[in-house]
Amino acid sequence: MLAALLAIGAYLCGSLPTGLWLGRHLGVDVRSSGSGNIGATNVARTAGVRPALLTLAGDVAKGFVPALAARALLEDQRWIAVVGVVAFFGHLFSVFARFSGGKGVATAFGVFLALAPGAAGLAAVIFAAVALTTHYVSVASIVAAAALPAFCIVLGGAAPINYAAALVATGVVIRHRENLSRLVRGTEPTFRPRR
């Protein structure tokens, strides 16, 4: 019963559309501006750096808090993994945004910061290195997501957490399929935040 309640809470927490609500507060509909995504990158492009940082913090927290709660209150690694994955999918399919959502990178980081902090930290380093080198947030997101399951395995993560990492990584890559198409066509924009 507790595990099910935590999973429901994780979905609702993950569903909170931080960027969408912050954009509305500032008079910007991020879904109809820039890339149309509700994540921190598009908020930075359309509303500015400060709202983007708040979006990033909110999106990380809504993955971190449910996963940390599950880790503290549950013993079964399978249910802990489920709670983390549900929070991630809450971001992708938000009940507060008609079951649409973002690409899940920051929320995934929050989940694994709680469940596999070493792997999450290494993935964050990869993300930063690729983003600084290429100036493509999408490329950095895909590479870091793809590396996450490998880091979990190498660092000796429990099998359910490793499977969760693989599922979340797949979700992130699928969510970036349009970015991949634009990269192939050479039309993917580099990151340039609004001043």
Image (cartoon, rainbow, N blue to C red):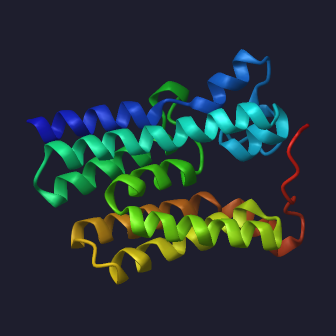
With 167 as the anchor, is 35 left or right in this view?
right
Q: Position of residue 177 (x, y in %)?
A: 66, 64
Q: Is residue 105 left or right of residue 77?
A: right
Q: In the figure, 167 relative to 107: above or below?
A: below
Measuring 27% from the left and 34% from the top, which residue is drawn there? 8
Position in image of residue 113 (x %, y %):
41, 55
Q: On the rendered image, what quadrant is the N terminus found in?
A: top left
Residue drawn at the location 11% of the way across and 56% of the way down: 76
* Quadrant of the snapshot with the C terminus: top right
Q: Position of residue 153 (x, y in %)?
A: 34, 80
Residue lying at 36% horizontally and 37% vertically, measured from the top left = 11
Relative to 88, 191 lies left or right: right
Q: Residue at x 22, y 71 (%)?
A: 158
Quadrant of residue 10 in the image? Answer: top left
Quadrant of residue 149 in the image? bottom left
How many numbered badges does the structure rendering display? 0
From this view, report whether residue 172 is shown above or below residue 155.
above
Task: Using the rendered view, name the quadrant where residue 144 is placed.
Answer: bottom right
Q: Is residue 100 at all visible to an observer of this figure?
A: no
